[in-house]
Amino acid sequence: MISPSAYPWAEGETLGQHLDERGIPRRDFLEYCGKMAVILGIGSAAAPRVAKALESVKRPSVVWLQLQECTGCVESVLRTENPSIGDLLLDVISLDYNHTLMAGAGKAVEKAKTDAMAANKGKYLLVVSGSIPTKENDIYTMIGGKTARMQLEEAAEGCAAIIALGACAHWGGVQGARPNPTGAVGVRDIIKNKPILVVAGCPPIGDTVTATVVHFLTFGALPEMDREGRPLFAYGERIHDQCQRRAHFDAGQFVETFDDKGAREGWCLYQVGCKGPATFSPCPIFKWNTRTSWPIEAGHPCIGCTEPYFWDTMTPFYGRLPDVAGFGIEKRVDTIGASLAIGAAAGVAAHATMTVLHQMKRRKATRQVPEATEDEGANNG
Amino acid sequence: MAKTKLVVDPITRIEGHLRIEAQSENGKISQAWASATQFRGIELVLQGRDPRDAWAFTQRICGVCTTVHAIASVRAVEDALNIRIPPNANTIRNLVHGMQYIQDHVIHFYHLHALDWVDVVSALSADPAKAAAIGKSISPWPNNDEAHLRAVQLRVKKFVGSGQLGIFAGGYWGHPAYKLPPEVNLLAVSHYLEALDWQRDVIRLHAIFGGKNPHPNFLVGGMASAINLSQATTFNAERIADINGMIKRAREFVEQVYWPDLVAIAGFYKDWGAIGGGVPNFLACGEFPESDVRDLKSLYFPRGIILNKDLSHVVEYDQKKVKEYIHSSWYDYGKGAEEGLHPYEGETTPHYTGPKAPWTGYLQDEKKYSWMKSPRYEDKSMQVGPLARMLVAYASGHKDAKELIGEALKKLNVGPEVLFSTLGRTAARGVETVLLARKMEGWMGDLTGRIKNGDTATFTKDKWEPSSWPKKAEGYGYLDAPRGALGHWVQIEDEKIARYQAVVPSTWNASPRDARGQPGAYEAALADNHPLVDPEKPLEILRTIHSFDPCLACGVHVLDAEGNELSSVEVNT
């Protein structure tokens, strides 16, 4: 990502000038933009548009808040795959605040943050990982003497848009699982007046974040999203529909228990609890860790971590999705996913149920580019 | 000079939320307080759930030390249900955990700790030719050459010149405590950047066995990644070749970059071998079983305790002697705040009594000041982590550890007494990383050797079905994680988790004062012959705190044994 380069970003320099100085052939750059355009789901024909946007940008300020969390999302972004052009992508950003990597501490970094927010008012991108604890006057997470809620509200006020990164910022995450001891909630439960994009997962794949940022820089807006606020380029497909083990599902070949004959033949993990039929995630397409593998490929059932409230709706993890007679018919799998949500509705909910049902319906919904995600997200209705 | 009170909040380049307060006089710290300022309550979330799911929940205690809570959890459940996992699964867990150590320690050294010792701005005035000469003198690493270092320097120059300093804004550049020559600073900056690329590569081992990193998948009873040499989608020769490459590159980087850098940089900071020692007791629960986790003799990193820095004697560790106190922590105990409780009797009723937010004063003026409890072993404070492990190994006559520690001490021309310090903690982390980087190949050989002999089993299914479990069971899972000794205690009733408790490395190290007034390891280290030149630029505090590699999300946990609602909390005004 930040591999040594003789050509760092200079003040006032645009990406186009920067590439020239770096000696990157225009052809390579356009090819890269084409790939990025495909990842973003806007088609390779949009490559010149991506290129034009990237060439003209200067390094925008990114402020990254880490609230009630485990730092797994930062670690995941550190694993982002980067071809030679990838280091430019991070050069494109000026990461003005991030706990895990900042050189200074205490007052010095809090000042760096407020300086960056003031200098880039209305323009900076706010990344939030971690939830916001709301019980007992918000006292369960304090940073620099302020509550997580205060930190979030201050940083959100002048930002252009928010990326809610990971399950905790999405809906509360693991500490928000039943009985949610600290009253943990997601960003959209606190901030109502800013565009919020959710990069879902526990943690999400780092590459999804990179691509989202490119989209933001290229088009000056967040990518089009599903009802959960998740970008469609990453979360528009269900794991089950893209799974490399799908043929075995259709053929009725199932792993009955771990390390059995079926497991050694790479058969379908549905019977040992796979939540792929109810989960929208780019795992089978982007894969993990420089496209090395992903959970189902490595033999473990999907735990559904990109779905809201998955710690309650998808558990027990090794329990089968509600049984229906026969397998291998698309319609029935849809029913499985929907029943799961309905079956788990106790406690959490209508919210999750509606989400899954909505996702089942939205498969062929017309796509539209939202200007802002409000509240529950009014897109793709 | 008058006493100065100071606050450093947030402490950055750590996992989680930590606040350090201190008092300084005449350039020295006289007292310090460590406050954990985040509380999540994950153990409470675990109650009533399927124990086979627990690893996934506990893994999310921390995303930096990902894998460690998952392995401790499956070990606790396997202990409770008396499950013996196949040798292949044990070896795979060692490989996964071993690579976690290696990657995590290197990231810690370069990305979390180095900027305490390395002045990035000073690297701008280095002579790249001289830097290359120094680099070549300490290592055969090919990128220690003039052209590469010149390119790095130019890049940093332009970066600084752009005025957009990003993560380097607010650093304490030019602080008088920085002692490295510009050329060594340049080498370190170059390796900081290289390590970012390296870590992404070697950790792919987790994706092969666990599907992803962070938070790879585990399984009670073994591992889910099946082995079949004749299948394209399982663990096969293509995967073996990929892993062998990662292990090779991991070892090369550790031996040719991390270790030589560590020894070279330590040479300029020998005075830190007499600073920040603190608590003189060290606890290691042991790690990397060569056979079954119950066979303590087979642990590559041995178990034991060192008391009062006495390396002539290793005391036996018994988990029954661990107790947690809440004298200075925002909790209540049924028996009163001065009692200690063993984890099997653990209670957590949060009761915040600190000032109302935002905090404008000092928590040091309060009796209670942290969400961290205070674990004590036979009522003594302990240090855990790489230094504890390497001291126990050294004192136990561990051949590999003794050799490497001896080599480092000789190169620096110092005695073993310098190990009890801030520098010692940082050096010990490097020592164990080298040991593991050399060990991985052997574990891979064990795995492929067994496969060659026809043993491809990775999972024991006997006790998978809950109907095969006893009505009641309890188990202890230990694991010496990169940051130190970790224990998970689980009690299972009627196929569900009745009670779950974890005592983790950063609870030991970051604990506040106990009922006897004994400080935790961070607090004691900061008050041990510890300089602080300028309270406005607390660089020295960061050195000592980072030498422990804090992980605060791990440290703060809660268990309510009865599954009660958390008590209501009154906030004092």
Image (spheres, rainbow, N blue to C red):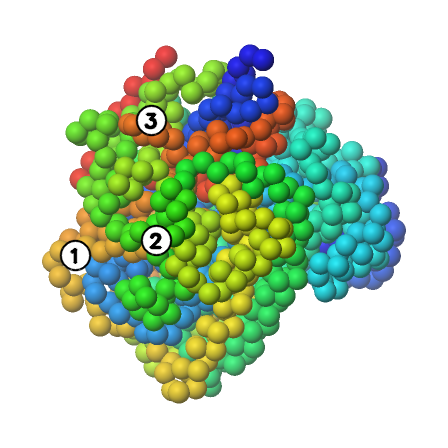
Q: Is residue A235 above or below residue A320?
A: above
Q: Which numbered disc covers residue B517?
A: 3
Residue that badge 2 annotates: B314
Identify the image quadrant of residue B495: bottom left
Q: Which numbered disc covers residue B473?
A: 1
Contact (Cβ within 8 Å) of mark 1 with mark 2? no
Give the mark nearer the N terminus: 2 vs 3.
Answer: 2
- Give the residue type that dot 3 points to: Gly
Disc 3 chain ID: B
**Horizontal side, residue B398 vs residue B565: left or right:** right
Q: Quadrant of the C terminus of chain B?
A: top left
Residue at figure coordinates x 59%, y 32% from the top left: B540
Disc 2 chain ID: B
Q: The residue tagged with tag 1: helix, strand or loop?
A: strand
**Horizontal side, residue B275 vs residue B86: left or right:** right
Contact (Cβ within 8 Å) of mark 1 with mark 3? no
- Give the residue type that dot 2 points to: Val
Q: Same subunit under labels 2 and 3?
A: yes
